Amino acid sequence: MKLDSSRPDFAVQARRQDLDWSSDEFGIKTKQQHFQPNTWVRLLELPNPYSFDEALLLCAISQYEWIAWIPDHGEAVLSTRQFRRI
């Protein structure tokens, strides 16, 4: 009997799951932060490697999106999940 170790007995399909730890699905309650225009915030995701890690909020587009100015990048639309209060 020859053992063929290159062929598994079952197929495994790799799936990528994006887990949102801040959602209520995992039982974590997040407090909705209320931001104001002309407020500096810390960026959690940089728009490019050369931009600053802070942004100035200019105006709200919706409850979850803001137009912001990022030094060495310019204006950008940011989701409230992309920044935190300083």
Image: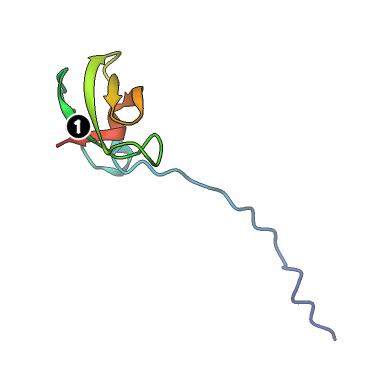
Q: Position of residue 52 (x, y in %)?
A: 29, 37
Q: Position of residue 9 (x, y in %)?
A: 72, 67
Q: Residue furthest right?
A: 1
Q: Residue at horizontal 24%, vertical 42%?
A: 28
Callout 1: few (<14), some (14-19), or many (20+) C-alpha neighbours within 10 Å? some
Please name whichever residue, 43 or 14, is drawn nearer the observer in this view of the structure. Answer: 43
Q: Which quarter of the rendered picture does the N terminus lie within?
A: bottom right
Helix, strand or loop under label 1: strand
Asked if residue 79 can be seen in this view, the reply is yes
Q: Residue at horizontal 76%, vertical 72%?
A: 6
Q: Which residue is mark 1?
A: 41
Q: Establish if 25 lies above or below 37.
A: below
In the image, taking residue 14 as reference, residue 68 lies left or right, namely left
Q: Establish if 35 lies above or below 83.
A: above
Q: How many marks on residues?
A: 1
Q: Residue at horizontal 31%, vertical 34%?
A: 82
Which residue type does callout 1 highlight? Val
* Residue 55 picture quarter: top left
Please name whichever residue, 58 or 72, is drawn nearer the observer in this view of the structure. Answer: 72
Asked if residue 33 can be seen in this view, the reply is no
* Residue 57 picture quarter: top left
Q: Position of residue 56 (x, y in %)?
A: 21, 25
Q: Which quarter of the rendered picture does the C terminus lie within?
A: top left
In the image, taking residue 4 as reference, residue 34 lies left or right, namely left
Q: Position of residue 62 (x, y in %)?
A: 29, 14
* Residue 41 picture quarter: top left
Please name whichever residue, 36 or 72, is drawn nearer the observer in this view of the structure. Answer: 72
Q: Residue furthest bottom?
A: 1
